């Protein structure tokens, strides 16, 4: 495909291609066709990446805030300039509409610009001591970071994995998803072109289990940063424990949306339906469980079905497309399983429920209502265009349903009652709560979860501090 770039790894500034290396077929999910071959790392490549990260950390930890800030601002400028080519590559490899890919590039640039400012603000503190004595608390970079990013936000996920460590003075080995390598490479390339020393950021690809075992077993790595499923997150946490690594874990969710009786329904529906369509529901903060006050349940469900059934599904490169294909063949299979199981257990499928066509990985926007709690999809993250709508009696029951699962990433509530808004902000167990909004992610705000959704944050000042350790210095 002419406008999809050729692929390589980036180790110590060298572009690593081919040779006797194994390769991975990168597929366009809108067509099911292979668009490129990706070389995969062997253990020699990973050792080289580790050595480079070790040397890179030794110099970058001594860099000034000015130097770090300049690199991040420079990379952000290049990302803006290259927005169109990065966005096209992201859509070709992941499937999302081009407008969503463009927005990803913009968010990544804004995040780097925010982090560029944070380089100057990793303050410690001076402790109160008698005259002649001093004690202080400092933040220091934790060390080389092994970072694993998934395919659903091919631009933003790698940007988050790179920006925090680089602002903090760490080096980083990024293994982004093999399904979406071009966008990740574009992020690393922008940093290199902005004069980041080449050994500070490496991009490798490989068999995920081989790469993570190799990197996390090395004494060089000091931190694990992972975004992905709870299951893999738990597995990697155990590997990280052997070397007592710092961890940032951004895992799955099952976003509750509480809709109370006092809302202006048209506005709520327009907002939540657009949020549900986003990236075909393959978003860790996607709204999934719609918990609706019983007196407005039918109105909400009917309005939701009407709007979502009108979604223009198609190739993400077509300008009219509102929702692209799913990103890989595992997702439509999972959707079919969830729908069949929910039906078997007595749920109603109000719209959708099937694949679209036999080319690519398209799936209909789907609404399931009155699903019993035993339906698998009521407890497992759908990660697809499925909306679950149920009716509840009273605020207490609605909050109980929101908190029922072991996840706690993003939650949303719609109500105009100010006192209830406060009770919800206090009572919902989640790392991010949106009240009368579907937007819970911003460069200056911590992004992360609680419970099985993980710990640690990306974005905001917290995203930089997560890559630092504290040291107390006492002077007698
Ligand atoms: P998966 O759980 O196998 O993989 C999730 C991610 O982890 C992928 O990027 C994969 O490359 C990586 N991974 C898998 N095993 C790994 C290992 N041993 N070491 C290092 N990295 C590893 O499943 P999948 O089919 O890619 O995605 C399915 C599920 O993952 C979804 O249902 C969703 O729950 C979750 N997911 C979450 C996010 C998120 O943003 N939190 C993103 C993508 C996927």
Image (cartoon, rainbow, N blue to C red):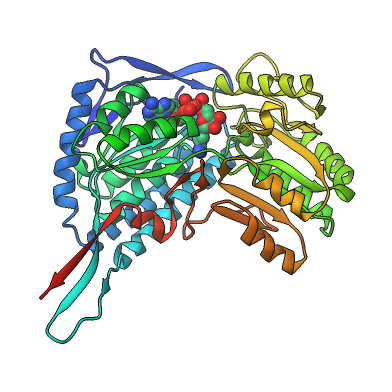
Against 37, residue 304 (above or below) is below
Q: Residue at x 54, y 47 (%)?
A: 103
Q: Nearer the viewer, residue 410 or 385?
A: 410
Q: Residue at x 57, y 42 (%)?
A: 407
Q: Is residue 365 left or right of residue 34?
A: right
Q: Is residue 170 left or right of residue 271?
A: left
| Residue 230 position within the rendered picture, expressed as x and y whole percent measured from the top left | 49, 34
Location of residue 275 (image quadrant): top right
Is residue 94 visible from the viewing direction of this image?
A: no
| Residue 6 position within the rendered picture, expressed as x and y whole percent measured from the top left | 36, 25
| Residue 209 position within the rendered picture, expressed as x and y whole percent measured from the top left | 35, 23
Q: Nearer the viewer, residue 223 or 15?
A: 223
Against 34, residue 319 (above or below) is below
Q: How many marks?
A: 0
Location of residue 248 (image quadrant): top left
Q: Nearer the viewer, residue 237 or 9?
A: 237
| Residue 32 position within the rendered picture, expressed as x and y whole percent measured from the top left | 55, 17
Is residue 466 visible from the viewing direction of this image?
A: yes
Against 425, residue 199 (above or below) is above
Q: Residue at x 34, y 57 (%)?
A: 465
Q: Quadrant of the C terminus?
A: bottom left
């Amino acid at each position: 495909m002419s406008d999809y770039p050729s692929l390589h790894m980036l180790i110590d500034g060298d572009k690593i291609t081919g040779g006797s290396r194994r390769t991975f077929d990168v597929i366009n999910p809108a067509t099911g066709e292979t668009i490129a071959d990706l070389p995969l790392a062997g253990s020699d490549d990973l050792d080289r990446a580790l050595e480079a990260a070790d040397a890179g950390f030794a110099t970058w930890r001594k860099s000034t805030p000015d130097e770090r800030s300049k690199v991040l601002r420079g990379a952000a400028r290049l990302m803006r300039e290259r927005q169109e080519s990065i966005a096209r590559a992201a859509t070709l490899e992941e499937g999302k509409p081009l407008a969503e890919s463009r927005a990803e590039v913009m968010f990544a640039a804004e995040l780097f610009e925010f982090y560029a400012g944070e380089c100057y603000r990793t303050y410690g503190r001076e402790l109160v001591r008698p005259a002649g004595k001093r004690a202080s608390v400092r933040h220091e970079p934790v060390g080389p970071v092994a970072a694993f990013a998934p395919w659903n936000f091919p631009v933003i996920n790698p940007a988050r994995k790179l920006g925090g460590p680089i602002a903090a003075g760490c080096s980083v080995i990024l293994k982004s998803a093999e399904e979406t390598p071009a966008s990740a490479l574009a992020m690393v390339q922008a940093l290199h072109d902005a004069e980041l020393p080449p050994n500070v950021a490496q991009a490798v690809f490989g068999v995920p289990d081989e790469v993570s075992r190799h990197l996390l077993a090395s004494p060089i790595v000091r931190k694990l940063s992972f975004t992905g499923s709870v299951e893999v997150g738990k597995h990697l946490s155990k590997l990280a424990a052997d070397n007592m690594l710092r961890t940032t874990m951004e895992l799955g969710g099952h976003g509750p949306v509480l809709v109370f009786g006092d809302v202006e329904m048209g506005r709520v529906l327009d907002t939540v339906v657009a949020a549900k369509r986003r990236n075909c529901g393959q978003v860790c903060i996607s709204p999934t469980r719609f918990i609706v006050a019983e007196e407005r349940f039918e109105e909400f469900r009917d309005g939701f079905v009407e709007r979502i059934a009108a979604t223009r599904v198609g190739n993400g490169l077509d300008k009219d497309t509102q929702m692209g294909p799913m990103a890989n063949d595992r997702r439509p299979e999972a959707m079919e399983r969830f729908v069949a199981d929910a039906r078997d257990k007595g749920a109603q499928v109000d719209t959708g429920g099937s694949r679209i066509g036999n080319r690519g990985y398209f799936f209909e926007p789907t609404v399931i209502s009155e699903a019993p709690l035993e339906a698998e999809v009521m407890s497992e993250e759908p990660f697809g265009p499925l909306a679950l709508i149920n009716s509840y009696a009273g605020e207490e029951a609605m909050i109980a349903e929101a908190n029922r699962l072991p996840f706690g990433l993003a939650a949303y509530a719609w109500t105009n009652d100010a006192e209830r808004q406060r009770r919800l902000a206090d009572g919902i167990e989640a790392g991010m709560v949106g009240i009368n909004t579907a937007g819970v992610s911003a460069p200056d705000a911590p992004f992360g979860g609680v419970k099985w959704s993980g710990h640690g944050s990306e974005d905001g000042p917290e995203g930089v501090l997560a890559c630092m350790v504290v040291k107390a210095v006492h002077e007698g």
